[in-house]
């Protein structure tokens, strides 16, 4: 690592709008240690050789003193039930963020909390298998003990982690699981934040601050699985797919095995790989004896298509891997050691300097930036919410969303595959600044873990390496060169993008855009810039998009535009924060998009945001960010109907999709020939 000795004085102060000078060191990230590649972590699925149990439900929670977050580690609270500490224990649901569950204390807690529950494991699980404990996500840092023994630890929220806990479990008896969860963000975490101490009326207390615009919810956010595998088992799978012009599908696969057994009759001899269509009929198969990678060819394959691009979107096959040990009695006596089934969509993804193509067809993305966020649960996984959100996405006619600003649940990724919703998959690097080596290494790890987790999803069409980094700063150049070079080496056939808010031109020109495959930018014309001026959108937006394309020669997407809107607030003429203003602002953006679409390199429009969401407390946010097209309880604002009209009109124009029957309301027989003019409300 070569540290320049110069000290750069850079403009800074996005947090409170005041420009304050900040001194920053600039690093040349020439030598860095790439993350150790993630292994394992296949999503837990039942099969004839695997059992899966969830440890979701009501856990117990202890809140550490913010002034002494590591007291529990020093005093070994994990050695016994948390009740033994004599401190207050409260019930806490899993999965959920803990912040909005109680009526006091917890919402703005800074530091650690301790979760605990007990569970039983049957004696049957002791023989010839391994038992794994897997967390879908704990934000931000987690340390896990089973029966007082350290089982695993993990940093970076929104990502899964697991460990084989067979050796520390009590089979046929009660087990205790203890999780310490720390929500503190620093300059080196992804995302970044700062903890400082303030003097309150009752003394000093630590507070957490951050520049990103969503609440730093924390806790055990996704399901906790307990599952078994055979001693020797399939530990990991990577696939990539292609579709030829004559409809021959190709699946390249690789599997990894893990574990050993002293019993030689239990050593795997071959793998049977079978691809089954949605009726269960075998479409291709292969027996693999020596190596664990291969290729399946699927004549007449049914491709994976996005929603509204094909009558049967989201078509998935089941790719079955069965690990066998041969018996001397011949094939009939072969024993299945392990079986795992992976849903697989067959499609070709490619890109040029002007287009992103799926199965050879240029894509036009219409969708949203979103958040995993809801009342009470915060960022906790909620299947009811997930199903509702996908119903709304389809109702509005969107075909894509960006997982702004962190990886979303694995369950939502599976849903996207099944429904044909395309995903721009973003890692948790939001608003990064101060480009130090420790940040780079965590940022690389965030991307490595994300790509490892999501590489087999047909829905993933791009990796977003960051949202609104301070990419115009001098320190950003070598940082992003290192980051992008590394990410490209593990990108699994997807283009790299980012949501940029720096400028396409000097003096605040973005240092990242030139390194990407697709340039995405966020721009709030008539909101943060020129508030109230919906007559200052079309030219500014079209000119800026053109600058991005001219300067960097890449396809361009607008990843964010929008206006905060209080549901039920109306104003004629339109005034900011009213529903009327949101409608007017969107409509002007649509004009700009249509101009831009004529230039083939403009490949997508994403609204900010799908739904209202919670943020930290600030005087610019009324109960949170209100730029949702839907309210936080997932009901449409007026603009949702307008957006629906546009998204379906695009689907009609681009893919000849018939408009939904009740898109517009009957007004009068003299309007528009058929009497339908206004969108249905
Ligand atoms: C942005 C950010 C997003 C914010 C949004 C806003 O540019 O990417 O996280 O929520 O602006 O509404 O200010």
Image: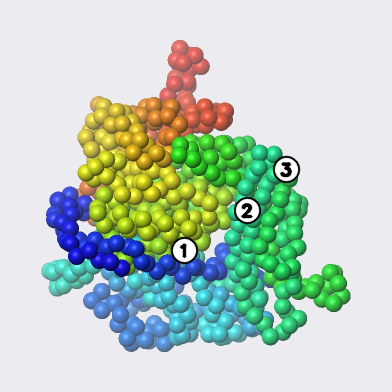
Q: Which mark, by number, is residue 300?
A: 3
Residue at left offset 43%, top offset 27%: 598
Q: Is residue 149 left or right of residue 238?
A: left
Q: Looking at the image, is 629 positioned above or below residue 465? A: above
* Alpha carbon separation for disc pair 3 and 1: 34 Å
Q: Which mark, by number, is residue 449?
A: 1
Q: Looking at the image, is 98 positioned above or below residue 616? A: below
Q: Which mark, by number, is residue 344?
A: 2
Query: Percent x, y for residue 503?
Result: 27, 42
Residue at left offset 32%, top offset 86%: 74
- Which numbered disc, 2 or 1, marks the residue that appears first in the sequence? 2
Q: Where's the C terminus, which quadrant?
A: top left
Query: Percent x, y for residue 240?
Result: 60, 54
Q: In which quarter of the image is residue 181?
A: bottom left
How packed mark 3 is, by other alpha carbons closer than 10 Å (few <14, some 14-19, many 20 or more), is: few
Q: Nearer the viewer, residue 82 or 103?
A: 82
User: Helix or strand or loop: what does disc 2 sit on?
Assistant: strand
């Amino acid at each position: 690592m070569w540290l320049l000795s110069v000290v750069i004085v850079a403009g800074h102060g996005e947090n409170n709008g005041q420009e304050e000078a900040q001194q920053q060191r600039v690093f040349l990230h020439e030598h860095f240690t790439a993350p150790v590649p993630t292994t394992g972590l296949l999503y837990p699925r039942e099969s004839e050789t695997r059992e899966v149990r969830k440890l979701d439900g009501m856990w117990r929670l202890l809140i550490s003193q913010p002034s002494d977050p590591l007291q529990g580690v020093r005093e070994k609270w994990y050695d016994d039930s948390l009740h033994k500490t004599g401190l207050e224990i409260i019930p806490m649901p899993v999965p959920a963020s803990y912040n909005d569950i109680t009526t006091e204390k917890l919402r703005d807690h800074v530091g650690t909390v301790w979760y605990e529950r007990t569970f039983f494991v049957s004696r049957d699980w002791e023989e010839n298998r391994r038992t794994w404990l897997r967390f879908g996500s704990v934000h931000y840092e987690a340390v896990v003990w089973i029966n007082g023994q350290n089982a695993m630890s993990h940093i970076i929220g929104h990502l899964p982690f697991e460990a084989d806990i067979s050796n520390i479990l009590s089979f046929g008896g009660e087990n205790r699981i203890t999780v310490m969860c720390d929500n503190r963000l620093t300059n080196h975490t992804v995302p970044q934040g700062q903890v400082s101490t303030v003097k309150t009326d009752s003394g000093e207390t630590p507070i957490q601050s951050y520049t990103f615009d969503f609440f730093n919810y924390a806790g055990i956010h996704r399901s906790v699985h307990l599952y078994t595998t055979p001693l020797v088992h399939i530990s990991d799978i990577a696939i990539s797919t292609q579709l030829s012009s004559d409809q021959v599908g190709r699946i390249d696969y690789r599997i990894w095995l893990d574990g050993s057994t002293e019993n030689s009759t239990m050593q795997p001899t071959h793998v049977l790989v079978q691809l089954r269509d949605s009726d269960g009929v075998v479409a291709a198969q292969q027996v693999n004896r020596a190596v664990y990678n291969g290729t399946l060819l699927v004549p007449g394959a049914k491709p994976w298509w996005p929603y509204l691009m094909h009558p049967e979107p989201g078509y998935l096959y089941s790719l079955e891997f069965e690990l066998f040990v041969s018996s001397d009695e011949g094939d009939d006596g072969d024993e299945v050691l392990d079986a795992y089934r992976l849903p697989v969509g067959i499609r070709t993804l490619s890109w040029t300097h002007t287009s992103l193509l799926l199965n050879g067809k240029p894509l036009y993305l219409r969708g949203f930036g979103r958040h995993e966020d809801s009342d009470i649960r915060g960022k906790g996984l909620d299947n009811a919410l997930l199903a509702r959100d996908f119903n709304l996405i389809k109702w509005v006619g969107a075909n894509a969303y960006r997982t702004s600003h962190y990886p979303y649940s694995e369950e939502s990724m599976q849903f996207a595959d099944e429904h044909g919703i395309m995903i721009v998959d973003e890692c948790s690097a939001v608003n990064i600044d101060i480009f130090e080596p420790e940040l780079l290494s965590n940022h690389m790890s965030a991307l490595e873990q994300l790509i490892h987790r999501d590489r087999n999803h047909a829905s993933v069409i791009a990796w977003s390496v960051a949202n609104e980094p301070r990419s115009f700063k001098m320190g950003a150049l070598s940082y992003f060169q290192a980051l992008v070079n590394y990410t490209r080496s593990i990108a699994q056939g997807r283009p790299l993008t980012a949501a940029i808010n720096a400028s396409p031109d000097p003096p605040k020109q973005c240092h990242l855009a030139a390194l990407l495959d697709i340039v995405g930018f966020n721009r709030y014309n008539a909101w943060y810039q020129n508030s109230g001026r919906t007559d200052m959108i079309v030219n500014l937006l079209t000119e800026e998009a053109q600058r991005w394309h001219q300067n960097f020669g890449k396809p361009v997407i607008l990843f964010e535009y929008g206006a905060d809107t209080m549901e039920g607030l109306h104003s004629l003429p339109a005034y900011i924060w009213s529903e009327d203003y949101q409608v007017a602002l969107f409509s002007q953006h649509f004009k700009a998009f249509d101009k831009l679409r004529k230039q083939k390199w403009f490949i997508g429009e994403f609204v900010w945001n799908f739904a209202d969401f919670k943020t930290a407390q600030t005087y610019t946010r009324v109960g949170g960010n209100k730029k949702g097209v839907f309210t936080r309880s997932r009901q449409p604002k007026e603009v949702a109907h307008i957006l629906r009209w546009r998204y379906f009109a695009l689907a009609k124009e681009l893919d000849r999709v018939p408009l939904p029957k009740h898109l517009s309301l009957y007004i009068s027989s003299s309007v528009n020939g058929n009497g339908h003019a206004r969108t249905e409300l």
